[in-house]
Amino acid sequence: MKDTASSILVMGVSGSGKSHIGRRLAETLDATFIDADDHHSPANIAKMARGEPLNDEDRATWLATLSGFYRDYRAQGQPLVIGCSALKRRYRDILRQGAPDLAILYLDGSRGVLLERLDTRGDHFFAGADMLDNQLATLEPPGDDEAIRLDIRKSPQDIVDEFLAITTGN
C-alpha cells in the first residue's frame, strides 16, 4: 500500500502505549483517534477494576461497536485510528469486518517494561500485574503477515515515523 491506510489499529497489551501512540499517529495523519477503552460497558469496566479479566462474551459487543466505527468512518471517507488491545486474532478479524484493509501496528514489549509503565499510571481502571499476566497469556501476537511489530522501547515519535515509513513505502 503506497498511501497511508485510512483505517489503523494500534494494538498491544495494557501499558504498551496504544493511546499515546494512537493519538500521535492520528494527529500526524489528520485522522480521528478513538480509545477503545472509552467504549467498554460500565459492567466491563467494573469487572476489570475488580481485577477480573474479560472473556470473549464480555468483549463481543465492544468489538462490534469498534468495527462499526471503522465501517462508518470508511463510508464517510474519513481516516480513523483506534487504540485497542485486540489480543486475539479473532478479535482483529471482527475489527476487519468494518475495515477489510485495516493496517495494524502491534506495540510489543517485555513484561518488565510493561509493568514499569503500568506502575506509573494514575487512575486507569486496569488493575496491576495479575491483569497484565492474563493479557500476556491471552495474547495471540500477530504475525508479520498481519501487522507491523514495533518495540515499545523506541520513542513514540520513532514508532510513528517507522510505521508511516513502512505503510507508505517512503
Image (cartoon, rainbow, N blue to C red):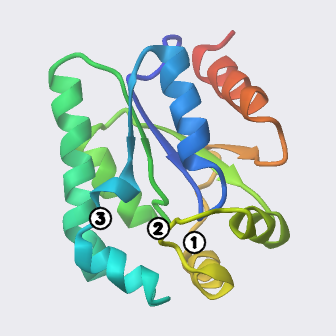
Residue 115 is tagged as none
Q: What percent of the width, then of the height, locates residue 21?
A: 61, 37
Are the residues tagged 3 and 2 within 8 Å (C-beta)? no
Q: Nearer the viewer, residue 23 or 142?
A: 23
Q: Earlier in the sequence, mark 1 or mark 3?
A: 3
User: Looking at the image, is 22 positioned above or below residue 68?
Assistant: above
Q: Quadrant of residue 131?
A: bottom right
| Kind of residue sitting beneath label 1 | Leu
Looking at the image, the residue that sits furthest to the front is 122
Q: Earlier in the sequence, mark 1 or mark 2?
A: 2
Residue annotated with mark 1: 139
Instruction: Name which residue lies at 31% across and 77% down.
Output: 44
Residue 88 is tagged as 2
Are the residues tagged 1 and 3 within 8 Å (C-beta)? no
Secondary element at tag 3: loop
Left or right of residue 54: residue 155: right
Residue annotated with mark 3: 40
Q: Which is closer to the viewer, label 3 or label 2?
A: 3
Q: Which is closer to the viewer, label 1 or label 3?
A: 3
Secondary element at tag 1: loop
Mark 3, Cα crowd under 10 Å, few <14 / some 14-19 / many 20+, is some
Q: Tell me the distance, in whole angstroms, between the alpha carbons under discs 3 and 2.
A: 17 Å
Are the residues tagged 1 and 2 within 8 Å (C-beta)? yes
Q: What percent of the width, then of the height, locates residue 148?
A: 64, 40
Q: Can residue 103 be seen by looking at this rendering?
A: yes
| Kind of residue sitting beneath label 2 | Lys
